[in-house]
Image: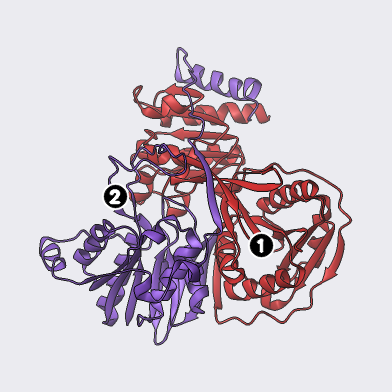
């Protein structure tokens, strides 16, 4: 079973996010960079599948050179090798362009199964996984919390709004992860030592037969960024007793805020 | 020349999702700005009796693709049918709800059509005839204005972000003759949480966090039910296994924008605040007077949630008579 994990390095979710001077991107100093949490579920699931069915796990990412840190972490968890597309031209790309690059890499990489995060918690696009599947002409199943591989098929439990659905797809296929799929392992010390010797293949767009013309201009452009209006603390509901506070809250919500 | 606005209607078991009405209403506003028609497209197995309803939200035409093959949402079949329709009709704008289904569908559609997609839009406006979509990034810590170059412009709108407006549309119903969109995905089964209000669509959300300390969420559920709302949870409550992942509110869970958000025993970590700060009114109940959540709440109560929440429920019950 050849398994590919699509991985992105993102700011840790506890990061305070500020807008850079150009107004179109975020300040990157003082940010702690981590594996996108949903991609961490993907890496863990890939390792569990490898442990059950044999094969290998390849991590593929598009990003700047420091992305090797995140790939190295996944290798320390137990993945076998990494491929990073690092090209200055890719920096301004949107989800669809990124999916095109990943699909081009995958056309040269043998795979039976691709696992991707449902979204990266920076752009929050929810786009790359299904788009890669489309470009490769393979089925995708979104927001998976459980999977089972039987012969040449994969059966996935996906979350939908208001419930879960069980779908089956022939391999090769792609699925995206949802929290609850697994509990990602920590890299062990021997794992970290071994990861140092594992290969990370760093390539440019030209190396995979692409160039800016063939990818085309990104179809979405960020025109401005702002921080949402900050919520301010309102008033504390006081009272002699818990009962008095509850009465006052419900009265306020009903008569003043008019939300109940 | 592309023209017209196409709204994709989402239904589950013959009931439209609330976000479908929001997508239609926003689609109507965009169509009015562009001075063009709004068309609704609906797929399903048994939808004849509900399709007509969409004319109340301004649909000039309602295209019905009815087949047993569409009884369940399957990415590949739906993508093929909708992409073929779009290629034939060439709408300028495609709008749909960013539900779980809508996110999956719009992502795959954008790749099939090589079309720009703005995911999870919370506002849409025109600047010098150019459509600008506002969408949250970084779990809502940033709002980005995005321009979309290409056709059609696909807008997946975040539930509970756009207002529903009634508008009479001509509502001409047309059957879409289609093959069944050939699928390699096979539906096995599904289970629905009946009677539960979907978290992202709820007008009221009552959430519990670490302060629940492993107790059953009974007090939270009771208040949520009284308010016709949904139950949410902080990440720690989910990590502890007290609630399913689908209840999680926050940067790595769901983002909610209800009219009323009641945070019980939630300290207010930055990731949680990102998931609920667009709520209209926020109430926080916490034992710790220093909890950061109080600085983001419109109303705060310092105290034991297990004592206070049932008392609030009692008052709500009285109010409802």
Residue position for label 1: B151
Res A2 quadrant in image:
bottom left
Q: What residue is drawn where x is 76% and y is 64%? A: B1
Classify residue B129 as left or right of residue B310: right
* Residue A235 vertical placement versus B67 (above, below): above
Determine whether the residue tagged by mark 1 lies in a helix, strand or loop.
loop
Residue position for label 2: A33
Q: The disc numbered 1 marks a residue on which chain?
A: B
* Residue B95 vertical placement versus A258 (above, below): below
Classify residue A182 as left or right of residue B174: left
| Residue A78 % position (x, y) | 21, 69
Q: The disc numbered 2 marks a residue on which chain?
A: A
Determine whether the residue tagged by mark 2 lies in a helix, strand or loop.
strand
| Residue A221 % position (x, y) | 54, 52
Res B272 quadrant in image:
top left
Per the model, the C-alpha gap separating discs 2 and 1 is 35 Å
Q: Residue A157: tell me if it is visible.
A: no
Colour red belongs to chain? B
Residues B216 and B227: in front is B227
| Residue B311 % position (x, y) | 51, 27
* Residue B94 vertical placement versus B168 (above, below): below
Q: Are marks 2 and 1 in contact (CB under 8 Å)?
A: no
Q: What residue is drawn where x is 64% and y is 24%? A: A254
| Residue B315 % position (x, y) | 58, 26
Would you call the spot at circle 1 few (<14 residues within 10 Å), some (14-19), or many (20 or more)? Answer: many
Labels 2 and 1 within one chain: no
Colour purple belongs to chain? A
């Amino acid at each position: 079973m050849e398994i590919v994990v699509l991985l992105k390095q993102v700011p840790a979710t506890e990061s305070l996010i500020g807008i850079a001077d150009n107004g179109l991107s975020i300040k990157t100093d003082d940010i702690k960079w981590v594996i996108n949490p949903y991609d961490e579920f993907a890496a863990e699931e890939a390792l569990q599948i490898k442990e059950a069915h044999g094969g290998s796990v390849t991590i593929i990412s598009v990003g700047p050179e420091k992305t090797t840190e995140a790939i190295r972490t996944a290798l320390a968890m137990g993945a076998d090798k990494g491929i990073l597309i690092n090209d200055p031209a890719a920096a301004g790309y949107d989800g669809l362009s990124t999916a095109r690059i990943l699909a081009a890499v995958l056309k040269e990489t043998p795979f039976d199964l691709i696992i991707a995060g449902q979204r990266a918690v920076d752009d929050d696009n929810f786009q790359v996984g299904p788009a890669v599947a489309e470009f490769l002409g393979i089925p995708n199943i979104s927001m998976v919390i459980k999977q089972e591989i039987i012969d040449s098929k994969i059966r996935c439990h996906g979350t939908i709004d208001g419930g879960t659905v069980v779908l089956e797809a022939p391999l090769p296929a792609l699925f995206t992860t949802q929290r609850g799929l697994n509990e990602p392992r920590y890299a062990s010390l021997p794992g970290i030592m071994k990861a140092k010797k594992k290969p990370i293949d760093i390539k440019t767009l030209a190396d995979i037969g692409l160039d800016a013309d063939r990818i085309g201009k990104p179809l979405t452009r960020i025109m401005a960024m702002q921080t949402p209006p900050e919520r301010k603390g309102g008033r504390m509901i006081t009272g002699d007793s818990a009962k008095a506070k509850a009465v006052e809250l419900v009265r306020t919500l009903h008569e003043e805020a008019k939300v109940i | 020349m592309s023209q017209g606005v196409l709204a994709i209607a989402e239904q589950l078991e013959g009931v439209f999702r609330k976000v479908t009405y929001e997508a239609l209403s926003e689609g109507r506003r965009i169509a009015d700005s562009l001075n063009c028609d709004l068309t609704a497209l609906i797929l399903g197995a048994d939808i004849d009796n509900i399709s007509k309803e969409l004319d109340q939200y301004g649909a000039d035409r309602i295209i019905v693709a009815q087949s047993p093959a569409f009884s369940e949402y399957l990415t590949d079949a739906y993508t093929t049918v909708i992409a073929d329709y779009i290629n034939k009709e060439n709408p300028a704008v495609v709008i749909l709800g960013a539900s779980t289904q809508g996110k999956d569908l719009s992502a795959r559609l954008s790749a099939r059509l090589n079309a720009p997609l703005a995911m999870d839009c919370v506002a849409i406006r025109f600047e010098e005839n150019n459509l600008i979509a506002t969408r949250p990034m970084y779990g809502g810590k940033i709002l980005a204005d995005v321009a979309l170059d290409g056709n059609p412009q696909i807008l997946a709108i975040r539930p509970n972000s756009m207002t529903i407006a009634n508008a009479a549309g001509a509502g001409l119903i047309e059957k879409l003759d289609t093959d069944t969109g050939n699928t390699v995905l096979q539906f096995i089964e599904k289970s629905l949480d009946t009677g539960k209000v979907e978290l992202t669509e709820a007008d009221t959300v009552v959430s519990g966090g670490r302060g629940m300390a492993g107790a059953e969420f009974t007090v939270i559920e009771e208040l949520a039910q009284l308010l016709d709302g949904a139950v949410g949870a902080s990440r720690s409550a989910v990590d502890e296994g007290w609630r399913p992942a689908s209840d999680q509110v926050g940067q790595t869970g769901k983002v909610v924008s209800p009219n009323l958000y009641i945070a019980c025993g939630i300290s207010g970590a930055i990731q949680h605040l990102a998931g609920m700060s667009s709520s209209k009114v926020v109430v926080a109940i916490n034992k710790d007077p220093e909890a950061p959540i109080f600085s983001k709440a419109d109303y705060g109560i310092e105290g034991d949630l297990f004592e206070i929440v049932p008392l609030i429920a009692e008052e709500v019950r009285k109010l409802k008579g």
